[in-house]
Amino acid sequence: MSDGDHLLIPFAASGEPGCRETLQGLSLPHLERLAARLAPDDAEPGDERSFSMPYERVLARECGLAAPDGLLPFAAWEMRQGGRDPGIAGWAWVTPCHWRVGTDHVFMLHPQDLQLDAQESQALLAAMQPYFEQDGIRLAYEAPTRWLAEGELFAKLPCASLDRVVGRVIDPWMPRGDAGKPLRRLQQEMQMLLYTHAVNEERTRGGQLPVNSFWVSGNGALPEGAARTPRGGMRLTNSLRDAALLRDWRAWAAAWQQLDERECARLERALDQGLSVAITLCGDRSARTWRSGGAGWRRRITSVFSRRRTADLLADL
């Protein structure tokens, strides 16, 4: 632990009304004590309209993946983590998904609601691949709801994070302008193709949701000098992600309490042992970091009187 221990927590809070209400009754004593003992450090400002999530911006910075909003190359970065060379090409994740069409909007469900299996996913990929190839895009299967895509388009077209779109109306997050026309057209073509696909017909007969579109995320080209792992001992936890995306705030609160009892308590113990500790909390809009080091005895004394409630710590994220 010579590089320290830095915990990155996405979905620590949300601007959703249900989350705001839940926060008022949420108690995270280990987090409260940590924040009181650590010194405020980096802030990652932003707003809920950015294509990239705050936690993605923080992680990208710590991995040397500097890029414009919507072009953080996590697909290429994860390839290299897995021992594959992405080169300088544009890569992206393609997620098969279900769009629920209303009278005046289109809403994306969580991919896990599809309960898509490998055989179904591979059959759909095989049917869709020729259309992607016409636009210079190669598809490869990775998991039922994650395909890997390579194409020049992904090196320069900003795309919204999947975590921005799940459980929301998709209109504000669609690829924009003339540069986004090929992808928007491809999405329309896939909706027509998938409408009568045998996999979907079988799924519908069985009471399952059909796959009727796809989403692109994690796109970009890996820059030179990108690190294989985050600096400073940073670890990302996704404990809160699914509950937050599903807007299940009771489950989110329970997951937060488990995270507090395990990870935040562990950081407290590391701090007691004199080790370097940091924690970054990320919401829909921004991220905030607290770090140890240089606090001294005055900080330990004042921390007794400066402890903030959980709701106050998380309110501005």
Image (cartoon, rainbow, N blue to C red):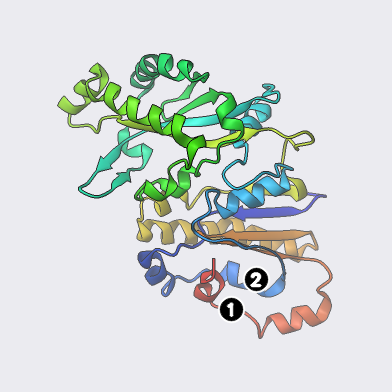
* Residue type, numbered disc 2: Ala
Q: Secondary structure at mark 2?
A: helix
- Position of residue 108 measured from the top left corner of the image (x, y, whole percent): 34, 43
The answer to whether the residue labelled 2 contacts the one labelled 1, judged by CB atoms less than 8 Å apart, is: yes
Rendered view: 49 above or below 89: below
12 left or right of 166 in image: right
Report crowding for label 2: few under 14, some 14 to 19, many 20 or more residues within 10 A (C-alpha): many
Decide if residue 12 is in sight here: yes
* Residue type, numbered disc 1: Arg
The residue nearer to you, when weighing 50 against 258, is: 50
Q: How many marks do you count on the picture? A: 2
The residue nearer to you, when weighing 191 against 253, is: 191
Report crowding for label 1: few under 14, some 14 to 19, many 20 or more residues within 10 A (C-alpha): some
Give me the residue at 41% from left, 50% from top.
172
Q: Which mark is residue 35?
A: 2
Q: Which mark is residue 296?
A: none
Instruction: Tell me the quadrant of the picture where the C terminus can be found.
Output: bottom right
Q: Quadrant of residue 189?
A: top left
172 left or right of 161 in image: left
- Position of residue 17 measured from the top left corner of the image (x, y, whole percent): 36, 67
Give me the residue at 17% from left, 31% from top.
207
- Position of residue 19 measured from the top left corner of the image (x, y, whole percent): 40, 65
Decide if residue 116 is in sight here: no
- Position of residue 245 measured from the top left corner of the image (x, y, whole percent): 40, 50
Q: Which residue is mark 1?
A: 308
Inter-mark Cα distance, 2 to 1 = 8 Å
Q: Secondary structure at mark 1?
A: loop
Rendered view: 213 above or below 119: below
